[in-house]
Amino acid sequence: MSESPNQEIKEQRSHDRRFAKRYEGKDLTVELLTKTWFGGFKDPVRIELRDFSLGGLSFSSSQKIKNPQILFHIYSRYHTLKSIPAEIVRQQDEGELYVYAVRFRLGFLPQSASRNTYTVLKHMESSARGETYSPEEESLES
C-alpha cells in the first residue's frame, strides 16, 4: 500500500522537527491560551518567547501548565495567526521559571487552514532569519 504525498510530507516534517534550526523570534508577539476545567480556554496571556521554528517554539512562564493541549496567537509585523493548536512536548523547572518546548499540531486544523497556517509560519520563520519580506513587495512582483 503506497502512502499519499501529504502523509510523506507530514512524516518528513515530524522527523526533521527535532533537528530544525530555531530562531530568536524577537519580532514576534506570542500569546498562550490554556484550557479551563470545563474544556473552554482562558484569556490569552503574553509569554516570553525563547525560540521559534516552523514546527514549534520554546517559551518560559512563571506558571506551571498542567494540560499539554494549548493554543497560541502569534503576531508579527505583517501576519497574525490565532488559535494555533499545540502540544507541550517538554517541560523543565528552572527555579522560579518553567521552560516549555511546544510542537504545533496543524493536523488538527482543516486541510486548507493547515496549509495556510504553514505558509504564514514559513513567512514568519524567514522574517526571524533576517530575510526581508513584505506583502507589498510580493504584490508588486505579480
Image (spheres, grey):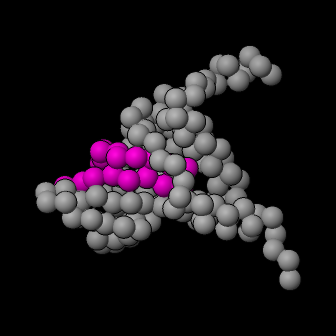
Q: Nearer the viewer, residue 141 or 108?
A: 141
Residue 45 rendering spot, x and y as whole percentages: 29, 48
Tell me the quarter of the picture where residue 131 sits: top right
Compared with 126, 18 (above or below) is: below
The residue positioned 85% from the left and 77% from the top of the image is 2
Compared with 142, 6 (above or below) is: below
Residue 39 rendering spot, x and y as whole percentages: 38, 70
Magenta part of the chain:
43-63
Q: Is residue 3 left or right of residue 37?
A: right
Q: Nearer the viewer, residue 141 or 80?
A: 141
- Asked if residue 44 shows in the view, the reply is no
The residue positioned 13% from the left and 57% from the top of the image is 96
Residue found farthest to the bottom: 1
- Asked if residue 38 shows in the view, the reply is yes
Compared with 134, 107 (above or below) is: below
Compared with 140, 57 (above or below) is: below
Residue 52 rendering spot, x and y as whole percentages: 45, 47
Q: Nearer the viewer, residue 128 or 31?
A: 128
